[in-house]
Image: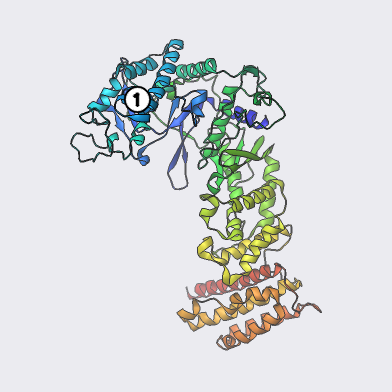
Amino acid sequence: MTLLSDLLAVYENNAELAGQSIEIPQKNGQTRTLTLIPPLYTEISPALIIPIDEQGRVLKNSIEIRLRQADQTRVIVPATMQSITRTSHLYPHLISDQLRFVVPQLADCVGGKAAKDIETLSAEYLAQLKDFIQQESLPGAQAVYESVTSGNLFNALVDTGILLLDEAGRLQFKVKKSDKNMRLEGLSALTKMDDILTSFVQFEYQPATRGLTLDDYFLTNDMVTAVQDFSLNQQKEPVQHSLMTGKRMPSSLSFPKSLIIGQANAKLISANDENNYAGYFQKSTEGASIGGIETFKSLNALRWLIRKQGITYSKGQYVILIWTDQGSIDQAVRKSFNTQASGPVPMPYGLSAPTKQAVRKTGTGQRTAATQRRALKGLRKNANRVFDAVHLLELRVATSGRISVANYQTTEVKYFVDLVNRWYQQTSWPHILSGTRQLADLITPSPAEIVQVGVGIGRDGVFTNENPEAVRYLQEIAQCIRQGGRLPRNTVTRVVTRVVQSTGYSEKRTGIPWERALEVACAVWRNYEGGNGKTMLDENNHDRSYLFGRLLALADQIEDTALYQKQSGDDNSRRTNAFNLMQQFGIRPYTTWNVLMDRIHPYLGGLTPVAYSQYQSEIATVMALFQDGDYNDERLTPDFLMGYYLQTAALINQRRERAAKKKQEQE
């Protein structure tokens, strides 16, 4: 129960934010709106927003219609233990729900099975709402009941043209918007009858004494408490000791889904299948007892954290989540619910303003988590902030309906930061060929880049498209980071092989230029060797693979320099012979070097005397470093890529320095 208990602590520490919308700043200057959902509440996307007064009368002029999905915003509405997790059986929500629940009069306007469904669903809805009103005396709920049962809601929808009936009183659909009888974008414009009946309706309670504020009545403290009490009284599950809190309370057999965006049906916990229960107990309730309210608090906190500060890969199939226990709102800007530009802003959703003595810092360590999240993404910055503890959670969506906990650990932030820094130290590499940085500037490739190069997929294949192979490699990389270990040999081999097969590398498919892929390959090989490889050209390195890589770089630069000096646009845009022969060079370096020298010989004659002398001297220097028996056709190790890269980078830096010096002299 450690994970659920820790998530419950997150909810309790941020309880004053429950129901509030907070805005999270983004890199592009925009914001994302997130809400910590109270227990036994759920999210819907209403197509109709219906304001009613204390008598249950619909305020027709204030009805809002949002048919387009782009215009619909998700709102929080009261629900029940059964309705939150409804699938095949459509248990009704408590207040706001689909049209077929809240407008029973529609049964007379449609025929066949649809009419029977409306009769059944609306009857269950009204019976439940009546029980709620009898148990909890709340005027808003009473007004909704009166509006539905009296026909006020149905009449208002017909009078305003939102619903169109023909002469026989039948509900119309697929009506052209040019019809003079239909209100602009009325529900009857939808192409299917079922689309009309399943449209969500949100009720807003607006009594005459309401005032000018827009805080949601159905999210006030009194309503939240009433919803929880009603669901607990309704619940038929046995009262047991909760393994989370130790208290006796009704256990939960129904658990929410939609914890991860892109995986709407996946649940972290599921224990309501008695027929197929595969455990060591006769009933699922005997396995683990978890209090219902506490369960929803924990899982709502998890949903909130994932959207707030999680890293989501492969359309939600793999999630990495980091949070701390430190208390500060941290980049969360509370959203004002005031309709006016000035005047007092009430505490949203009926939350009473805390006194100075009762103020409690809320938060989940978003800045700390963001720092470590940037680390896991390959964007190192300020990774040395220290707090008490950091929680690291990895989730896998194994099937469409189940979420598995791949890893969960709580450790000291300092220890975790040390592991992340070790990853950076062992996997960093210069950024010369694909950028304009200096040789001393080191960059660590992100896990996404490593997977893109190794698997041969684009960025969408890592983040937005489901790709089990990408998920497997991402999980391996995350394990290396959090354990301070080396990358697996198979991961390194795949990356190196794709880069060495230079002519077959597809920049269009991966979205990463070959030069950047080469840097990624050098970085992962350096990690595999324990971070011992130097990131500056080592002129005293006698490793044969390293030396052959330097020779390949010199041949590459000879041809590239000659083409540049020739100033031939057609020739300068093509790849060099050294690039085209790289794969063959790695297999048979001695033989391929002789072939390569024959091919670049004409380019040597095209160099300036200074450049010709420099390259000849460099080749002779490298040749002199070979030890007896090393200058042969034995297959090269990936060290030849490091020698190739660093020799190329050193020559590029020399040219930049000469160009800068020449420019300075001219000034």
Q: Position of residue 344 (x, y in %)?
A: 37, 24
Write the residue at 55% across / 49% down.
314
Q: Position of residue 490 (x, y in %)?
A: 69, 58
Can residue 399 be seen in the rendering of this structure? yes
409 or 115: nearer the viewer: 115
- Residue 325 lies left or right of residue 263; in this view the side is right
Within the image, what quadrant is residue 293 found in? top right
- Residue 590 lies left or right of residue 339; in this view the side is right
242 or 629: nearer the viewer: 242
Write the residue at 75% across / 71% down.
541
Question: Residue flagged by tag 1: what amino acid is it?
Answer: Gly
- Residue beneath label 1, please? 343
- Residue 90 lies left or right of residue 406; in this view the side is left
378 or 165: nearer the viewer: 165
- Residue 135 lies left or right of residue 116; in this view the side is right
Decide: is 45 above or below 351: below
Write the residue at 62% across / 79% down.
555
Can residue 40 be seen in the rendering of this structure? no
Mark 1: few, some, or many residues within 10 Å (few <14, many ≥20)? Answer: few
Q: Position of residue 21 (x, y in %)?
A: 45, 32
Quadrant that contains the N terminus: top right
Write the residue at 63% across / 69% down.
500
